Image (tube, rainbow, N blue to C red):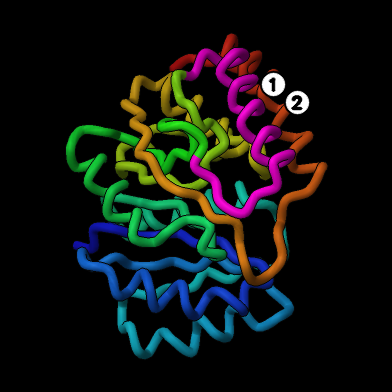
Amino acid sequence: MPEKLVIIPTYKERENIAKMIEKVMSLDGGFHVLVVDDNSPDGTAEIVKSYQASFSDRLHLLSRKQKDGLGRAYIAGFEWALAHQYEYIFEMDADFSHNPEDLIKLHEACVNGADMSIGSRYVTGVNVVNWPMGRVLMSYFASVYVRFVTGLKIQDTTAGFVCYKRAVLETIPLDQIRFKGYAFQIEMKFTASKYGFKLVEVPIIFTDRSEGESKMSKGIFKEALLGVMQIKMRSWFRKY
């Protein structure tokens, strides 16, 4: 039975995806990769297909018809992972802002008792490279705000570098996860915590992308800020 699946959502990542596939496949531990591509017009999916013969049953592609948000891409990947019986399911960006070698640390944290391990930029200070100071402060204080509203004990509440044990994704009603952008990351952590799962932060160094285009926008950030209140209020009427 396959054990570890790394889900990488893509939209116009032709500059990064080949190098990312090669790097993850070179790691010890036999990681599998699922690229969830949102109909990239730059040929990202075709690059993935060109590598599939080389990596046999370890490299998979899920092509979606349109760009529909990070959250929807991950939900599609989670459902695929559960259907294919993976035990450890990872979220990771395609742009090398997350160091693939840290996948090993996230996996070890779950093996050693975490239900959800989080690659954290802030658990040991501020570990971010190549971001302008304004963006660092915006991200850091956004997490402070999220902790204040939700009561989460996580320093990096918007982190997108995560390992889930299968049981977490089987328990969370994925069809009730509402948000598509960065609020999705908050909603998943908050919901996992409400169900009583153990969340553990693993320190990482986050490096801003050097190739390809950023998907961050004011709309995504606004969704995260406003969505936090909605996440909290909905929790008053749900049973966990």
Q: Which of the 4 image quarters holds residue 115?
A: top left
Quarter holding the C terminus is: top left
* Left or right, residue 52 beside residue 126: left
Q: Which of these two is toward me, 215 or 167?
A: 215
* Left or right, residue 17 beside residue 232: left
Picture disc at residue 30: none
Q: Nearer the viewer, mark 2 or mark 1?
A: 2
Question: Disc 2 residue type?
Answer: Leu
Q: Which of these two is toward me, 93 or 126?
A: 126
Q: Is residue 7 visible?
A: yes
Residue 118 screen position, x and y as percent: 40, 39
Q: Secondary structure at mark 2?
A: helix
- Reply above or below: 209 against 60: above
Task: Find disc 2 in the rendering and name its residue.
Answer: 226
- Reply above or below: 62 against 115: below
User: Range of the magenta residues?
Assistant: 127-152
Picture disc at residue 230: 1
Residue at 73 percent across and 78 percent down: it is: 41
